[in-house]
Image (cartoon, grey):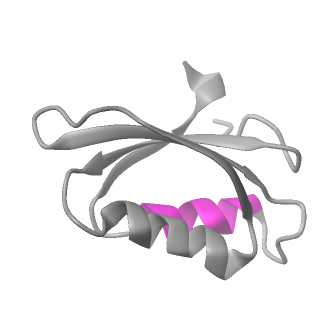
Amino acid sequence: RPDVESRGLGDVYKRQLLDRPGVLMALMAVFYDVGANILTINQNIPVDGRALISVSARTESMELPVENLLEKLRNVEGVLSIQSIRDE
């Protein structure tokens, strides 16, 4: 299953997060740590303690494969799911 919509110019990730302080910030810190450039962040109003967000990022300057980025994002406490917009 593909985990990104496109490589480099604007990879798009959809995530479901717990509605807790610091979860979105921890997720953004992962992008920063690997050298990805955030282009957009869209977040819906949380429902039932969960918030759906989408993030587009430039990843061409990262020194690790996108699969490693995805694994790091999955390991953030409070991230419930990650999928590609393409999977919809």
Q: Position of residue 51 (x, y in %)?
A: 28, 40
Magenta segment boundaries in residue numbering: 66-74
Q: Residue at x 21, y 41 (%)?
A: 50
Q: Residue at x 10, y 35 (%)?
A: 48
In front: 57, or 81? 57
Image: 30 above or below 17: below
In front: 66, or 24? 24
Residue most extreme to the top: 88
Q: Position of residue 80 (x, y in %)?
A: 30, 50
Q: Position of residue 85 (x, y in %)?
A: 60, 28
Image: 42 above or below 76: above
Q: Is residue 75 visible?
A: no
Q: Main secondary structure of the magenta part?
A: helix
Residue 33 lies left or right of residue 43; in this view the side is right
Query: Picture quarter containing residue 30?
Result: bottom right
Image: 3 above or below 19: above
